[in-house]
Image: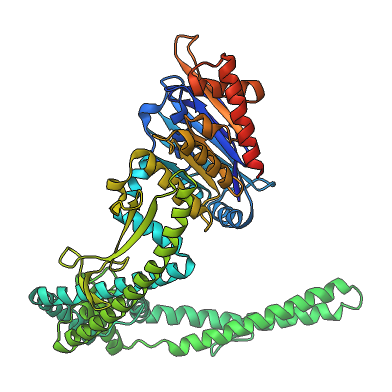
Amino acid sequence: MAVLEELRITGLGVIDDTTLPLTGGMNVITGETGAGKTMVVTGLGLLFGGRADAGRVRAQPGRAVVEGRLRLLGRVADAVHARITEAGGEPDEDGSVLLSRTVTVEGRSRAHVGGRSMPVSMLGEVGEQAVAVHGQSDQLRLLRPAEQRAALDRFAGPEHEKLLDALRESYTGWRRVVDDLADRRRNARERNQEADLLRLGLDEITRVDPQPGEDDELKTEAQRLEHAEGLRTAAQIAQQCVAGGAEATDETPDAAALLGTARRTLEAQAGTDPALGDLASRLEEAATLVTDVSAELSAYLATLDADPARLQHVYERRAALRALTRKYADDVDGVIAWADRARTRLSDLDTSDDLLDELEREGQRLAVEVADLAGRVSASRQEAALRFADQVTVELAGLAMPHARIEVAVLPRPAGRAEPTLSVNGVEVGVTSDGGDEVELRLLAHPGAPSLPLQRGASGGELSRVMLAIEVVFAGSGGPPTLVFDEVDAGVGGQAAVEIGRRLARLARSHQVLVVTHLPQVAAFADRHLVVAKDTGGAVTTSGVRVVEDTERARELARMLAGLPDSDLGIAHAEELLAVAAKERRL
């Protein structure tokens, strides 16, 4: 569950600075035409990652700010909190999250989530989980075949989604193999030319057979061989100093002997002062270290060899490596990496008959797999289409369209378009990553009427009710917990308007619902009624939002009913409408 508890809008359109306190049930926003109701929906869109329009930002103060507090609970809270924390934000201790979006007159946009600056896309991620905004533009979007197919797929449930994911994965693999095969055949000459050049380079590198780090090792060895005599003299002198040697005499005692004498002298007096015993121990450690150094110097001297033949070999080897580094990379490790990339690229360039035959067989296997999955997805859609149509039809009966019926046609996509063609369930169809189906919502307005696509068979008011019926059905099968409706009741009146209000109120039992409406029959069902009102007292017209209750609310409904907020008859009618709505909500 998610509840948008508060929305503050500053500097957006006619709204200077206003705060909307929202409740968890049905929130209705009303007001005269041009008062700024649309700016509330625009603000919501901005808060949840929508596109910013700098033209809507007020010149003073030069920026628009939309802030909201979203309280999250349950499954939605776990998913959103985890994503926000991963991005560096911090939800409040009570589970709520502070969201903010700023847009300047220059068009720059900034977002904050959980107290941290974030990309605007993060607001969009939160919005996908928490809020669904429906307006007249959404109705137009629902008329597109791709949107209708997506709507049916969402309704079909998680098992259908898994099947669809498997189809998309297989389709991607199939197209990759087919495109790879076509490219190898189409560009065989260019591929063979590039492969020849790579083989020449690999042959040259293979003959030299460079080893990782070899250039540095050879450089070090060359220096030792070039300076072998100087190194030997230094090592011999050091070795004689620390541990004596062939030329050592009694007059020039070595370091090990001196350390031994010092240790024994201190040990002789250790009984008198224990401090000297500690120093004697340390001298023993030093003597051990000197002995080790002496042994290592002896070993070093044994390895020194002024070998002109070896030095010549090192020179030749370094010259061979330099020849490679001039052509292929800056150092030997880079040459080895180039060879690895060349081998990989050669496999990509392969146009041998064996490989082409193998790709052909793999493409055919994947085509069979895609066709099978597309057939299973189609069957799943047809089953979901029957359930979807029945549930939406039931909702339409409750929206003053008792004789209307929705049909969901799942049809094979005609072959011969830009998509590849496969045989699915014995029929040649055009296949995409979404399968081989076209989905079309159709409306039978009354018995005997033809079944027509929504865009041809529904009036504006009917389309609004169909949209609401679909949303009610979606609400029963999951989806975002906060729903926003922007004048989806346009073109509706009378009993149909009452039924829309009743359906929205029922939807508000399990969701937070925000409705922008001009119909008093809808507004009467609200748990909280907010009015957007103009203020023309200053030099610049501004709008604000206030909560209306009791008498004020009746006056607002009277204004909506007859344009006469002070009419006793209008207020009486409004109070009667409120009483009916209150009774309906309790049922």
Q: Measuring 43% from the left and 67% from the top, which residue is drawn there?
A: 161
Foreground residue among 92 and 31: 31
Whole-percent x and y of residue 129?
51, 52
Answer whether residue 448 is visible to the viewer in this image: yes
Colouring mode (rainbow / by chain / secondary structure / one colour): rainbow
Q: Measuring 51% from the left and 16% from the top, which residue is drawn there?
A: 564
Foreground residue among 579 and 241: 579
Query: Is 411 situated left or right of 6 in this image?
Result: left
- How many numbered discs, if any? 0
Q: Is residue 518 above or below residue 268?
A: above
Find the residue positioned furthest to the left.
189
Whole-percent x and y of residue 399?
47, 44
Q: Quadrant of residue 428?
A: bottom left
Q: Which quadrant is the C terminus positioned in?
A: top right
Q: Measuring 40% from the left and 42% from the top, which residue is drawn there?
A: 464
Whole-percent x and y of residue 413?
24, 65
Q: Quadrant of residue 365?
A: bottom left
Answer whether residue 254 is visible to the viewer in this image: no
Find the residue positioned furthest to the front.
448
Query: Is 121 situated left or right of 374 in this image?
Result: right
Q: Is residue 381 above or below residue 250?
A: above
Query: Is 91 situated left or right of 327 in this image?
Result: right
